[in-house]
Every structure is written in structure tokens, then in C-alpha cells.
Amino acid sequence: MKKKRGQSLAILCPLFLCLLVLGCPEAIKLISVASVSIDKAEASLKEGETLQLTAAVSPSDASNKAVSWTSSDSSIASVSSSGLVTAVSAGNADITVTTEDGSKTAVCAVTVTPVLVPVESVALSVNSAEMKTGETLQLAATVSPSDSSNKAVSWTSSNVSIASVSSSGLVTAVSAGSANITVTTEEGSKTAVCAVTVTTALVPVESIALSVATAEMTTGQTLQLSAIVTPANAYPVELEWFTNNYNAEVENGLVTAKDAGTVKIFARSSNYKIGECLINITTAAVPVTSVIASQESITLVPGETDQLSASVLPSNASIPNVVWSSSDTSVATVSADGLVTAVSGGSAVITAASADGSKTDTVAVTVEASGISVIFEGPADEYIDMTAPKDVLRKSSWDSIKISVAGEWDSYEWCLNGVLEGALIESYMYFHSSENPLGYHELTVIVGKGSAYYSKSLKLRVIE
């Protein structure tokens, strides 16, 4: 019996093992992972948001479905072991899932955008400032709230010729005056202002040079001088102009030559720096502006003479000489001193000219061959002798003359420029330059003797 039991066990054990291997294959066969996928291939998140990603392993009956999660940049987007993505900061990151079996992977591209925090206000470190020319001041702008998404600002000046400002808020004082420096936020256009007052910095004068060191001038001439101050930005520059004598005058650098000689012109600063110019002054030639003959016209008979004279203006003309000439010496000649001599009947023009010939005046000469030398009406045997001390009067001198008629007459009538002055018993009349306009005037006297009347005329001239 015991022998049979041993033999049975020996037969059953191999059979059991065979049945175990051939009858239960599922219990020992492993299924490998073929692939893995994520429920989102890409995602957009704002800073602070989260997103749960889910991985699907294929085949679904894979023996090992374990996975792990990683981020290409955890500073932008992080991921937990369960696939929970957290948006950290703006940017792009890839979230990758990897299978434990086979290292199969899938990726979700995550884009993180910032959460915009609007600007509410901006403030400056200084609201007002006093500066000297050439100084600088760094302004700082504070944007609120402190976590504003866009803190960019720009800077402007209301007057860059007084105070300029750089893109970083550095203010430079340029010249005296006032200007507003404004900071403006890019987002929301919020502003803040710093009122800047600039005064000129004191820079002492080191030296002065005049625009002309030496000059030649004539009396009456002017010369404008300017002062060249060193340094160019010296302040204040208050100059006093003066001379060392009375040969010239100077005012604000304008020199007027007065008398011949040498003179020094000085410009002196308040800190006693001096520049000078040496000027040599000579007497200027005074040109003739006009020549005025003593008469406009004369009437003579052959052999008769008449002394002419001429006035040269201005009275201080450098060359006051007068040159006399006749247009027809066969009718009338004229001497160097203006004495006219009638030669024969006809007409001639006597010219009084300045020495250089630039200014002239003329006297019309009529020589009557009949021998009549006066203008009158009535018998030729009656002669009217009318005399005057001079025939050229100056209005500026208030000249006045007395014109007289010689002889005994019954009546006298005086006419000025054809206008009857009145029937007078006097044998004389006064002529006043102040009462008559510039130019020539004709004075006529009509005298009576019984029933006969005679007349004679006289030319007078009023000048300035």
C-alpha cells in the first residue's frame, strides 16, 4: 500500500505543474504602455490661476500606468505630482507627463499672461525746486499701486530753454526763469509736476576786450564798440563806459568823435576788469550844402557895374570859397569877387559855385543897350532913387531892413509881391524876415508928383 501512495504522488506532481502553466496564462503575462496623452495640448492661464491636467495611458489595461509630471520652467508654470498646473509669472512653459513604463511622454504648452493692475497715480520725489544755472537735479517718480502692471513713465519740460529734463528725470537748469517738469505714466496718463525756478549763477568777469583795439575817426563820426567778456557765461555783466578826455563821448559803447586828438574808451565791469580802445580823431571836412547869391536878377546898362555876393552854407564849411563865372562875357563879365560889369546889350547868367563845383546859384543879368537902368513909369527925366541896406535877409536872425525913396514926392504907395500895403505919406517902409516866407519877394514903390506917377521895384530874398 505504501508503495502505491508514493507512486501516485510522483505521477500527480508533474500533472499539476502542467495544468498550472497551461491552464492560467493570464496570471503571469505583463501588458506594456504604448503611449500617453494629456487632455489639453495647450492652455492659457493668468498669473495665479491653476489648471488640472489629466494623463491617459494607452492601452487602458497596461500593467503599469504610473506617470510623473515636470515643467520646462517652474518660474513661469509649476506642476504637482498629480498634474495640477499653477501659473507663476508671464511667459511660456511646457508641462510634460512621462510614463514610468516605457518613458512615454506628452506635452501641454502653457502660456501665462500677467494680471494687469491699473495705475492709480504717480508722485514725484520733489514738487518744487530752486536751482542755479548749470545745476542738475535727479527727480524720482513713484507709481501707485506698487504692483501696477505698467510703471513706464515719460518726462517733459514746459520750457526747455529754462530747464530741460532727460528720459530718466534728470533736470538741468539752463537759464533764469520758471518751468514745470511733468512726469506722465504710460498707462492711464497720470501726471505729477515739479515747479522749477532757475536763477543765474554768479560767475565773475575775468577779463574784458573791446571789439576794436584801435581806430581812426573824424569829428562828428560815430563808432559802435562792443565788449567781449570772458568767460562767456560771466554773470552779472554790468559795464560802465567812459573816456579819458573830452575829445569823444561814449554811451553804451557808441563813441561820438567831438574834437581832434587822441582819446581812450574804457569799458569797466563791476569787479573792475577793464577793456580799452585807443582812437585818433582828426577834423572832418565840412562839405558845402548850398550857395546862395545875393540877388536873383539884375538889370544894367553898358559900363554899369553891380557888386554881387554869395553866402556859403553851412557857415563852418571847410572850403567856403566861391567861384564866379559868366555864361556870356560879351554881355557881362564878373570878377573873382563877384563884381559884374555890363559890356553890351543882351542877357547872361552869372554863376556862383562852390570850390568843387557841386553847389551853385545863378543871377540873371539883363543889359539894356538903351541905357535905362531902373524900372519906372513916367517921363524919363524923373529918376526914383530907392535904397536898402541889404537884399538878403535871414529868418533865423530875425533880420529887418528899412527901404527909402529919395526926393520930394506928393504921395507914396508901397506894394509887396503885387499886394498894396497902403497909401502912406512916409518915404520909407520896413521889411521883416520873420513876417515873410523863404524865397524871393518883390517890393514896389509908386510915387506921385502932381498928376504924374512913377514906380520902381526892388528884389529881396529871405533865407533860413
Image (tube, rainbow, N blue to C red):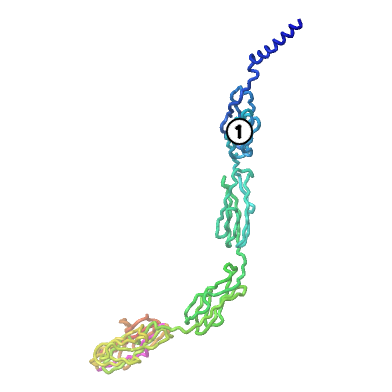
Query: Which one is nearer the viewer's eye here, 145 or 354?
Result: 145
Q: Nearer the viewer, residue 383 or 389?
A: 389
Q: Secondary structure at mark 1?
A: strand
Q: How many marks?
A: 1
Q: Position of residue 219 (x, y in %)?
A: 48, 82
Q: Residue at x 60, y 75 (%)?
A: 273
Identify which amino acid the numbered label 1 is placed on.
Thr
Highlighted magenta segment, given as a residue range: 381-395
Relative to 151, is 346 on the left or the right? Answer: left
Percent of width and height locating residue 372: 25, 91
Q: Quadrant of residue 231?
A: bottom right
> Residue farthest to the top?
1
Q: Where is mark 1, residue-wise?
A: 96
Q: Is residue 448 magenta?
A: no
Work out which quarter of the rendered image holds the N terminus and state it. Answer: top right
Q: Is residue 453 visible?
A: no
Extreme residue in the left direction? 370
Vertical side of 342 occupied by 417: above or below: above
Question: Would you place residue 149 above or below residue 131 in this image?
Answer: above
Residue at 57% from the left image edge and 71% from the top image edge: 229
Residue 170, located in which quarter of the rendered image?
bottom right
What quarter of the picture does the C terminus occupy? bottom left
Foreground of the two, 62 or 177: 62
Magenta-colored segment: predominant secondary structure:
loop
Mark 1 neighbour class, 10 Å CA radius: few under 14, some 14 to 19, many 20 or more:
many
Find residue 299 and report its horizontal and vertical position in percent.
28, 89
Image spot of residue 245 (x, y percent): 55, 82
In the rendered structure, does residue 393 fall within the stretch colored magenta?
yes
- Is residue 122 depicted above or below 5 in this figure? below
